[in-house]
Every structure is written in C-alpha cells, then in structure tokens.
Image (spheres, coloured by chain):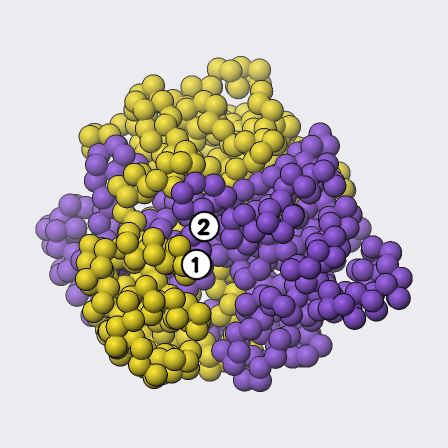
Chain colours: A purple, B yellow
Amino acid sequence: MSAGQYAPLQGVRITDIGWVLAVPHATSWLATFGADVIRVESTVRPDITRMGGLRNGADGINGINRSSMYNGVNFGKRCVTIDLTQSRGIELVKDMVRQSDIVTENFAAGVMERMGLGYEVLREIKPDIIMLSGSPLGQDGPDKDATGFGPNTQAYAGLPYITGYDGGMPTGLGRDYPDFMIGIHMAFSVLAALHHRNRTGEGQWIEIAMAETVTSTIPEAVLDYTMNGRETPRRGNRHPHFAPRGVYRSAGDDKWVAISVEGDEQWRALGDALGSPGWAADPRFATHEGRQAHHDEIDERITVWTRERSHYEAAEQLQAHAVPSAPVLDTFETLADPQLEALGTFVETVHPEVGKRRLAGLPGRFSAIPDVEYGVSPLLGEHTEEVLCGLLGLSAEELAELTEQGITV
Amino acid sequence: MSDGALSDLSVLELAQGVAGPFCGKLLADLGADVIKIEPPEGDRSRRHGPFPGDEAHPERSGQFIYLNHNKRSVTLDVSDEASRGLLRRLVGEVDILVIDLAAKELEEFGLSYEELRPLNDQLIMTAITPFGLVGPCRDWVATDFTAYMMSGLGFQTPYGQVTDLEAQPPLAGGGYQTDYLSGATAAAMTMLAVFYRRASGEGQLVDISRFEAVNAMLRNDYSAASYTPELVPPRIKHGYSWVLPCEDGYISFSPFIADHWWATFRELAGKPAWAMSEVFDTAEGRHANNDVLEALTVEWLLTQKKMEVYELARDSGMPCFPVNSMQELVESRQYGHRDFFVEVEHPEAGVLTQPGPSARYSATPATVREPAPPLGAHNAEVLEGLR
C-alpha cells in the first residue's frame, strides 16, 4: 500500500489460516492497510476458492493460481504451504505465531484445538496474541458442529425468512453476500482488539458466529416478534413505511428503475417529476394509507412513465425533484457506472500468471491516504522460502528436508 | 467510564436512522464514550418502531432502542447558528465525529472537514452519505432500498433463481441491510483511521458511501467479470437453489455441489432409486441435469421435516440449515445455549429481548451498560460545561 510513511497497520503481522471467503475478506482489508498477512495453505487441503475449476479460471483456463474468486479476495498477502496434518507442520505454524500479532481462522468449531492450535495453546506461546475464530453457529452449543457456507448460514440467521416476493419462498441475498458482510465485522473486531492490545498489552480471543452476525443486523424483525409476537411478512419490494416503493420497468431489456417515496412531500415531488399528470392529484392517493391501499394502481401509472425512459434517465429526472430513485444496475453496468468511477471503486492489479485484472477495491476513501495501492494475490506457496528461511530463520538445508518430507507442500 | 477495548475513544454521533448509529453502537458497545446529537424532534428511528403494542412513542421504538444503548443524548438544531457553535466546541474535544448529513448540508452548515479540521487536527471525521462526497451522484437522495437496488445486489436477489423476468423483478433484501452494512463498514474504516492517527498524529476525513459499501459485497462477480466475463451469472435461473421447500417449511441445502456430499445425501435419503441414477454420479452430471435433480429432491423433501433433514445433514458434515423464522430463532437451542439474545430493561419500553453483539471478546466483551437515552437526557451534563 502507499500510505506514505504512516501505513495504519505497518508492523502488524497476521498468520491467516482462514479460508474460503469470510476471513480472507477480513484480512484483505488489513493487508491493504499495511499488515503483513501470511496465508497458511497447502496442496493437501487447498483453499476451495482456488479449486473452482473453469468456473473461476482466468480466460477459461483452470489453474490453482488462476481463480478469480481467490484472487479477488487475497490481494496484498503472502502465502506459505504447510501441511497441517503433520506435527512438524503444526510446529512451523506455532513458530509463525510467535512472530505474529494476530491469528485468523474459520475452520469448523474444534478443528484448531484438535490440531493443537487452540487459543489456550497459542496464548502460551505468545501471551498477547489476538486470535479470531469464525464459524457458522459458534464454537460451543449443541449445534456447534453444523457446517455451512454463507448462503446456508444466512438461512439459519433469519434474513431469508424476511426476504422474498409477496407470498413467495424465503430468499437469500446475492450468493456470497453474507461472507463478505461478516468479513467486515471481523475486520472491525480485530482492529478493536488490536487497539486494546496497543494500550494495555493484553491480547484476546474473538469468537464470531456467522449466523449471529447476520441476526444482529435484523433487529427490527426480531423485536417485532419479541415485542408483539408478530413475524415480518415477505412483501417483495413493498414496505410499511414507504409507498410507493418498488422497481419499475424502464426502456431496455430487463432494465428497471427503483423508486421509494416516504411522506406527502415526496409524493408531491414524484408527481412534479412525472409532469404533474391528473391521476397524481387523485385524492385517494393523498395520504400514505391511501397510497398503500392503491399501490398496484399507482405502480401501473408510474410504469407508463418509466417505460419511456432508460433507467438512468428516469432516475435523473426523479432526482431533479429530490425523489429517492436509482437505476437498478447489473454487474456490467456497475463496472461502467460514472459514480463508482468517480469514487475509484475498481482497481487494477497485475498478477504474474493471469496478467492485468480488475477487482473491486475496499469501499470508502481516506483523505490522508489518497492513493491506496492494492497488492497482488499470492501464488500457492510463493513465499514459503521467504517466510520459513527469512522470518523463521530456517537454513536452506532444513527447508529442503521439510520439502523432502512433504511438509511444505 | 467503562474498561472496554475502545474506552479511551470519544465519539460525537450526528447521525440518524440506522447506518451512522450502527457505527456508533459498534464503538459504544466496546466502551467508547458516544455523545449522540439529535435534532429537537429526535432521531427519526424514534418514529420507526416496532413499538410494543404498536403504540408509537419516541422512547419505545425498537429500532432506536437497539441502536442507541450506551450513548448519551443531546439535542441540537444544526440549522441554528448558536447550536452549531456548541457543536463546534464539542468537535474540538472528541476523537471521532460520525456524521450523516448530505454533502451539500455539510457545506451549508459549515460542517465540512475543511472547516472542522482547524478546530481539531486530530479529528477523525467519518462521513456517511448515500453516494460519497464526490462524483456525479454526490447530491442524489437515497434510501436503504434505492442504494441496494443500484449497487448490483438488487439485481442478484434472488440469486440466479428467477424463472419469469417480468413477474420477478430485482428484489429488496429484508430489513435494512444497506444501512447495517454501511455502519459496519464505517466502523472498520474509522478504526483504520485511528491506527493512522496513532502513527502520524493526524486525523482525517473518512468518506463512506452506502451505495459503494453494498457494491463491494459483489467482489466475486467483479473478479469473475475481469477473468471470464461470460461466467458472470445471469438473473434467470441457472444453478442450484439455496432454499428448497420441505414438509413444514424451508431448508437451505446444497448436497449437489460436491461428490462426497452427494454420496452422503444418497445415504441419508435411504438410497431411493431416483437418487442412485448414474446421471447424477458426477458434479457435471448433476449440474447438467439440475432441473430434474432439483425437482426430484424437492419431491423427497416435501415428505421430510426441516429439522430432521438438518440434523441428519449436520451429523454427516454436509452444509445445510433450516430457514428460521424469528420465533424459531428466539427459541433456537443453539442461540439459547450461547445466550445470544440479550434482555435489556428499558425504563419506558420494558424488558426487550434483542440480538446481542456480533462478536465475543474474551478480554473486553461488548456490553449493554445503559439503555438507550431519553431524548436530550444529557443536554445539561454535556452542554453546561461549554456555555
């Protein structure tokens, strides 16, 4: 990264035994802002995001270093290969932990303990270590052994129950949304614990259950149940506080514009934006309750107008009257969106195997760090020698021996 | 004063609704001293609910109570110059300002970072706006819903499961995901600025866009678009469903992806003839015959109870979870064992059962020390010293 001389996390080292998406997303933030994140991987049990096959291979060519999914979330890190099924491998990880500030992992509950890398062990080796453990439902309790990915885990957590078309099935958000969302909570937690350690010298264990994190972001639905015994119904794009609210057909193939109106003033503004058609002055629509009651009819009227315009044009005309509205963009449209371009959202990295590729940077801008530089995702085992010999002080002969024994594979 | 991880940090929160207050809550739960500035009529989440017995009351809104415990409430009218004078005095004394005024309001009220920095060169100003402080949409207005829809995530909800493009438009996420996500993003970015200040001695502006925060959740798709564009998923159904119906509800089930899960599924389903078909032996075969496979699986699931399937899958190490309702969550054995839900006694609203913190810290637990404050409860305490 290029934060001048003040990279926020300069001097912080992380042994990252996390895999798939959630923990790697968290550590990508930390690596980008100066932490030395060393991923521990192996060919014995490769990170499944490296193994996506053609689904993820660059230019349709498969390869363990060519996965878009892996490379989209591991930028700026180093990678060593160590076989964690061998005791010598575990010793090497402990040697790394001795020189680390933070350890991150998201194996199933209990796996770290079984490998001899539980928090109590790591704390003995490095008393002020901060350890982050992520799992679907937590490290204790009757269901601690349940396994799942983000999309399954959000189901447990209640978010799909309140998401869906009117009267339809529960629905997940995106595919991997929960993993990435939880990764941000993880990054925050690690930073808070590091702040505490910097002040007091005290390390700690942070335990995050993915399901609990998701549930902590739907308190309104939880509280409506605990207060009033009521489940929040799935209502498609409609909402009790906003009317009309929805996505409306615009010109083009599967193009839509989103509109959300709250209160009488915005309703009048919507009418103005639509050119003050007579129907907008219908007294049946004058109140929020009336607009809820006649939502279908209002939607049809609005669609007559939106169909004649592109989604960007419609949103711009509505915004000119301060009506909350936006084009509904797909992946390729967001890649070309002028606002995201102005924010510098997408960045380019040059990877040794797959060349120049674009990825989504981290959201937000720091005035004191105007040019955040994004590193490249590591090749499998790219830094094994550098870390084992450079950091841990092994000799070339010792490394050769480990390689011979199949430990650094 | 608390002894939480962030108990040395003071925060001024001039923000309403969900995003800014959730950022403030994440900091406050770890011990930061958060002074919440509300307009004279109160934070709009005081009018949001849910309310006990559906009776609206500014001190009984569930959303407000959840988001604002551990904070102090001070009322100031930012459109009034004298109030802004007090606000500037407070800005001079805190570490962090979390603010959600629109870009043009920051300028109109003299609250831009350029104008506040001379008052406190160590100030970290975390500005949360719909679109960020620069760019052609800087002054656009937005809600949780419109930002979600523009971000690309709306187009992917439901993910790859649409069978009728016209009847199934891009779909809102339940609740207020844009805003909770933006608040968490702002909290993490704010902490990075705290580390920068520790190294440099200087504060800075942290510019958070809600639209961009959600957009960043699609990084897999952007990476795929850059590697193999034709593999970016379409909205129309193209892969396995993540949610399937069963006899008594729904289940999120993915036995089709890996061969060993599929073998496990064949066992736990009792090796029915349809599942044993050779066509489904390989991942490629299952993918190519997805529609048939899924229909047959649903036929079987409709004779099964979701908790029974879940428990069989769990014990076999196969990814699978029931789709829980709020009641099922509140009654969940697992959440119960972990005491995830916390009971918070609020003087006006009574005892409320609400979600606990999203992370457990062994040394510095996140805690609820004080319930959400009555509107302006700390005016005297905070403002007297300034006058």
| Percent x, y of residue A144 | 45, 46
Q: Residue at x 60, y 46 (%)?
A: A113
Q: Residue A264 appears at what percent x and percent y?
A: 23, 46
Residue, disc 1: B317
Left or right relative to B378: residue A320 = left
Asked if the residues shown at circle 1 and circle 2 are in contact, with their CB atoms under 8 angstroms apart, the answer is yes
The type of residue carrying mark 1 is Gly
Question: What is the C-alpha distance between the residues marked 1 and 2?
Answer: 8 Å
Query: What residue sits 22% from the left and 34% below the top?
Result: A228
Residue under label 2, please give it. A145
Tell me if residue A7 comes above or below residue A78 in the rendering. above
Comparing B71 with B124, the one in front is B71
Quarter placement of the C terminus of chain B? top right
Looking at the image, which residue is at 63% across and 55% down? A17
User: How many other residues sit within 10 Å of disc 1, few (<14), some (14-19) or many (≥20)?
Assistant: some
- Circle 1: element type: loop
- The residue closer to the viewer here, B18 or B315, is B315
